[in-house]
Amino acid sequence: MLSADEFDRRHIWRPYASMTAAPPLHRITDAQGVYLTRVDGGRMIDAMSSWWCMAHGHRRPEIVAAMTAQLQRMPHVMFGGLTHDPATELAQRLVRLLPPGLDCIFYADSGSVAVEVALKMARQAQAARGHATRTMFASARGGYHGDTWKAMSLCDPETGMHGHFGGSLQPQFFVRRPPVAFGDAWIEDPALNGLQEVETLFAEQAGRIAGFIIEPVVQGAGGMRFYHPRYLAGLRRLCDAAGVLLIFDEVATGFGRTGRMFAMEHAGVWPDIICLGKALTGGHITFAATVASRTVAEAIAGGSPGLLMHGPTFMGNPLACAAACASLDLLQTGAWRDDVARIEAGLTIGLAPARDMPAVADVRVLGAIGVVEMRSPIDVDRAHARAVASGVYLRPFGRLLYTMPPFITSDRELEQIVTEMLNICVIESEDV
């Protein structure tokens, strides 16, 4: 008889993995705070916040209590023709958090679906305004917007993880990634700051472009790059002039990860549509939201068929809404701001020695995000196996070794994360 792990590897696909050559696994039986407990009783710090969503730590009592209470009343009910208090209460919290005007909320069940909904909103709004030829979208290279079909077409078509789908995806318009790094001096020359390329694209193709989607300030899974907020101000101006709707994908950056509630706050620029997810529920259950301006919503309502053509089965799930309300209540206390600043300082100081290692190309930190970019791809299986001895779970990809720890990570735990990242850098440098 197959063991549980052998059965798992034989029958269950892992993310971005082969079914016939499954990667090694750590079987987790419990999660609490920043720790994951393996079946052998060993513990590991979840330095990834379980793919960036577990902002408050695992099994946060306030969120668990809210979900438990909701579970005992109503785990789910369809959203067509019905509503419930958790959905209304969450909408009230989101409207208070977001800039004035971003107040028309569509609930979805994952960040990727939130992006799909945003693209539908933009397309329908443009058609309703009489722009029937605006069927395409634009984005910056180096971006990542999810694994669903339309979202895949807006990930980097060459260096992104979906490039091998090639002609199966609808071609979109791409400009180079924002070239000025976060923290560097802004370059006013549009030819050097990347905005001239956007302006040229719009001059030539605006009549075909419904919206421009971008991850504000932080390009996540496409390369973990941090760019200058002034780029967004210029992009907002160019979109307005060309009649292109601006969409911000804050699925990974929203709810405090960059040191601001939303990454767009670094620029003081607001989009026409914003996508939220991951930490929306504190990572306790999958959920997302696409929030549009009243102007966009009214345009869609005034067109044909006058309806936003999307409706997931689990739209507005009460259990997820309750979790999100509890998570936002935790954020409203403001304690996360000090925690993120503390983590940023610890990562900045702790990862500095990596800059002098031969295998390291760059080190960058923003908020509770620490990135070490290597010169060559990292041996992921070797790093994965080290988690047992080090007590730190890291999940590198490509040339990137990074951490996005929960905000509650203590200084001692952060030091442990940094130490293991440096150890991996040393091992990779020995192979140079």
Image (cartoon, helix red, strand yellow):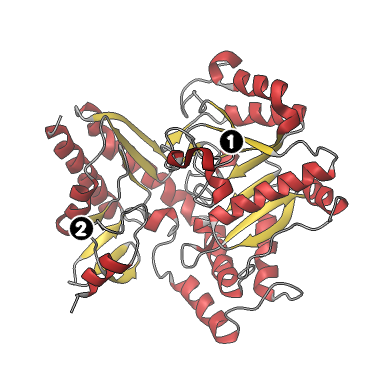
Residue type marked 1: Pro
Residue 3 placement, left or right of 227: left
* Mark 2, residue position: 391
Residue 355 at x, y = what percent?
A: 26, 29
Q: Nearer the viewer, residue 430 or 55?
A: 430
* Mark 1, residue position: 171
Q: Quadrant of residue 264?
A: top right
- SS under mark 1: loop
The residue drawn where x is 53% and y is 50% is 251
Image marks 1 and 2: residues in contact by CB distance under 8 Å: no
Of the numbered discs in the image, which one, if any, rests on residue 51? none
Q: Nearer the viewer, residue 376 or 372?
A: 376
Q: Quadrant of residue 422?
A: top left
Label 1 or label 2, whichever lies nearer to me, is: 1
Residue 11 placement, left or right of 337: left
Q: Residue furthest right?
A: 302
The residue drawn where x is 50% and y is 28% is 177
N-terminal-most mark, 1 or 2:
1
Q: Residue furthest front?
A: 167
Mark 2 neighbour density, 10 Å: few (under 14) some (14–19) many (20 or more): many
Residue 255 at x, y = what percent?
A: 53, 52
Q: Nearer the viewer, residue 336 or 105?
A: 105
Residue 4 at x, y = what percent?
A: 23, 74
Residue 167 at x, y = what percent?
A: 52, 38
Q: Is residue 407 visible?
A: no
Q: Is residue 85 visible?
A: yes
Residue 14 placement, left or right of 305: left
Q: Is residue 417 above or below residue 309?
A: above
- SS under mark 2: loop
Quadrant including the N terminus: bottom left
